[in-house]
Amino acid sequence: MKDASPQTIHLADYTPFGWTVRDVHLTVKLSPRATRVVARIHFAPRGDAPAQDFFLHGEELTLLRAAIDGAEVTPEITPQGLTCPVPDGPFLWESEVEIAPADNTALEGLYMSNGMYCTQCEAEGFRKITYYPDRPDVMATFTVRIEGDEPVKLSNGNPADSGAGWAEWHDPWPKPAYLFALVAGDLRNHPGSFTTKSGKEVELNIWVRPGDEGKCAFGMEALKKSMTWDEEVYGREYDLDIFNVVAVDDFNMGAMENKGLNIFNSSCVLASPETSTDANFERIEAIIAHEYFHNWTGNRITCRDWFQLCLKEGLTVYRDSQFTSDMRSAEVKRISDVIALRARQFPEDQGPLAHPVRPESFQEINNFYTATVYEKGAEVIGMLKRLVGDEEYYKALDLYFERHDGDAATIEDWIRVFEDATGRDLSQFKRWYSQAGTPRLSVSEDFSEGTYTLTFRQTTPPTPGQPDKAPQVLPIAVGLLNPNGHEVVPTTVLEMTEAEQSFTFEGLSAKPVPSILRGFSAPVVLERDSAPEERAFLLAHDTDAFNRWESSRDLARDCLVAMVTEGAAPDTAWLDGLERVIRDDTLDPAFRALMMGGPTQSETAQVLHERGHVPDPDAIWDAHESLRQAMAERWQDLLPALAEEARVTEAYRPDAAQSGKRALGSAVLALQTRLDGGKAAEAQFASADNMTLQLSALACLVQAGRDEAALRAFHDQWQDDRLVMDKWFALQIAATTPDKAPERTAALTEHPAFDWTNPNRFRSVLGALAMHHTGFHAKDGRGYKLLADWLIKLDAKNPQTTARMCSAFQTWKRYDADRQALMKAQLERIAARPGLSPDTGEMVSRLLS
Ligand code: BES
Ligand code: ZN
């Protein structure tokens, strides 16, 4: 158990560890409740570190023996680790501990999943395996000997030797302990190989439970594509003889980049057309790429301390989004990323959990793997690239790899590389890493005698602990269209640095229509009261796909706000403009599907809040329903033709072209269901030969309340497939009406297949409730109570997943006084729980502050 009183760690307090570690030798003798870990570690004092006691992290370990240079020692042990007097010079530390992986329900350190041993050491899990300086700036080579009867025994690096009941691995690249991994079990492999551009042969394997062999081919192809892409775009080659990927059913996160041995949540690597949706395939491709790309951005160059987390995560998310843009449609990827940013990061940045991309303090680092560190961290890199240009960006990256290979680096190092490579002063830009909150950007315009002037103003609202904000550097991509809809000024990046700043364009014959913040060139809220006619004009003519989509989204937002607050009817002018885009079969079906999508209900709540209204979830539900109904009725004659266009006749492929068609098809089916009560959906459900079609049909049937038989059939077909059953659980909550959502959730928690200790299953049920906007915010608070009950229950087993899911409450201050009181009461109930984990404790206290 951790100490009950949580400690706050500050970036400003960083001190290096007093010793270097030359190498680590581990012997792990596996046994479910009595695994022995023998460690032999060479330490040498570092002259350049401040004097300190010799302290090794260690949690939930039973120390059996410790020795220094062969002589037994008796360290002083606390719940966090041990201290021990040590010699002045280099010495050999030896220890033997016992641990119980079968009892490890937190899924951090060494644990068991379906009889298989596996590890998760990021951020601070290695200290649950052995005593060690468990901090990312201590890097060492590892040699690992695994002893056990399991047929497959894996660790990092290259295989060194093996015999009956043992296997040895050696990782030649110095690494921090958080990248350590070990896997052992009865696993099957899907093999592959890759030849690097310098001719090195690499053995590839995806390891899975028996029975899952048929779900590996797509992941293997994604891995090879990622390896090629990183060579071609960043010049980065793989650096070991072997690359192993393992699928695990019980995993708190999506996947982990352990050196040479990536471990994946099985939901993020296993795929087949029958069991996975197009969205699953796309996510798997992206996450395989992400973890692979960490080999350079994270592993070869790691973080000095956990405050620098965005150094590896922001950059690697940026790289995986570049990869997806190259593999699929760049425009569709950009729009999807912005949708996700607004859905996840904006609420965080505008609520009680707001923190800078590089936080300055934390209690539990696991709570800072956030949308801000990841997604805003990636946006910051995108802005940097936009400001310096592509060529200078890759020049800076080359310098980064050259200068910092083998280092545990900081954001200061990163910025300096860009300054040195480009000759720019980036001191103001660096504010993006330290200042929390989403800037608001407003615009006014002026036109006289051929000169057009845009004047921008930026302000950032206060966030917890940061009442006063300074102006940020904003790259604002702008294009100008003439009144005929032709582009007269192509995309130009304006560099805004002041609180208020004007930019002029000369030589225009008529007042142009500006297309501002093209490609969402900076993560801000653009406040622009432009006339609906101007938005409709951009919807029809903008050459920038993102802004074309955005202009429709803006009109949709205005329409929904008017429907909610004034009881207005749907905006027919906007629907007409939208219809022209949807009808345009020269446009990518995926893009048209996104255009048909419209804001989610929580986005409408967010917009209402931004505009000074108190969002009423029931009124938002009604407005969305009547808007969707109006769309269905208006486009009644168009839908059959679109459905026909969306039909795929070739064999299933999860590529961008086919997925786009199916996305359009499911948007159409959802509208058709409003007209035919589910007839078309029933037919699609009956004939579907892939999960994308089957699931979208089922969603429509649930929505139409015509789901009993279909849900039963789906259950009977898929009850032995855990990943498909996760969808079965989630869907019937996500697609149902608000009045039924909490009850359905409660009923599903009674289902025999509801294994709540499995994070995927827990999320598929309670996470689906949290994401059902109206259902979660049921007026009497029963949604809040149900979630809180389950968070309390899960916390005793799995603090990390519990703490992450507390963010469902992060928007609580947005709602009416009654709902606020109900949510606050649940947060206080969680906070008051005896024995609450420090992870959840920190989240709840930040939410309440
Ligand atoms: N390094 C993380 C995994 C991780 C996260 C470990 C939190 C420990 C705590 C990994 O690279 C990652 O970022 N995974 C993401 C998916 C990715 C595509 C953004 C995840 O697991 O969700
Ligand atoms: Zn990552």
Image (cartoon, rainbow, N blue to C red):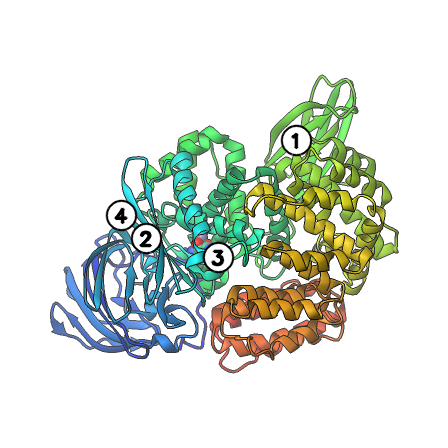
| Residue drawn at x 65%, y 37% as measured from the top left | 588
| Residue drawn at x 62%, y 63% as measured from the top left | 810
Q: Which residue carries the number 4 mark?
A: 241
Residue 478 has which mark? 1
Q: Residues within 10 Å of mark 4 (few under 14, many from 20)?
A: some
Element at label 1: strand
Locate residue 379 relative to residue 617 in the image: left or right: left
Q: Which residue carries the number 2 mark?
A: 260
| Residue drawn at x 74%, y 63% as measured from the top left | 703
Mark 3 vs ligand 1: CB below 8 Å: yes
Q: Residues within 10 Å of mark 2 (few under 14, many from 20)?
A: many
Mark 2: which amino acid?
Answer: Gly
Mark 1 vs ligand 1: CB below 8 Å: no
* Mark pair 3, 4: CA separation: 24 Å
- Quadrant position of residue 821: bottom right
Element at label 2: loop
Mark 3: which amino acid?
Answer: Cys
Whether residue 414 appears in this view of the structure is yes
For discs 3 and 2, the disc positioned in front in the rendered view: 3
Mark 1: which amino acid?
Answer: Val
Looking at this view, name the residue that lies furthest to the bottom.
Answer: 834
Mark 4: which amino acid?
Answer: Asp
Of mark 4 and mark 2, the one earlier in the sequence is 4
Of mark 3 and mark 1, the one earlier in the sequence is 3
Q: Quadrant of the N terminus?
A: bottom left
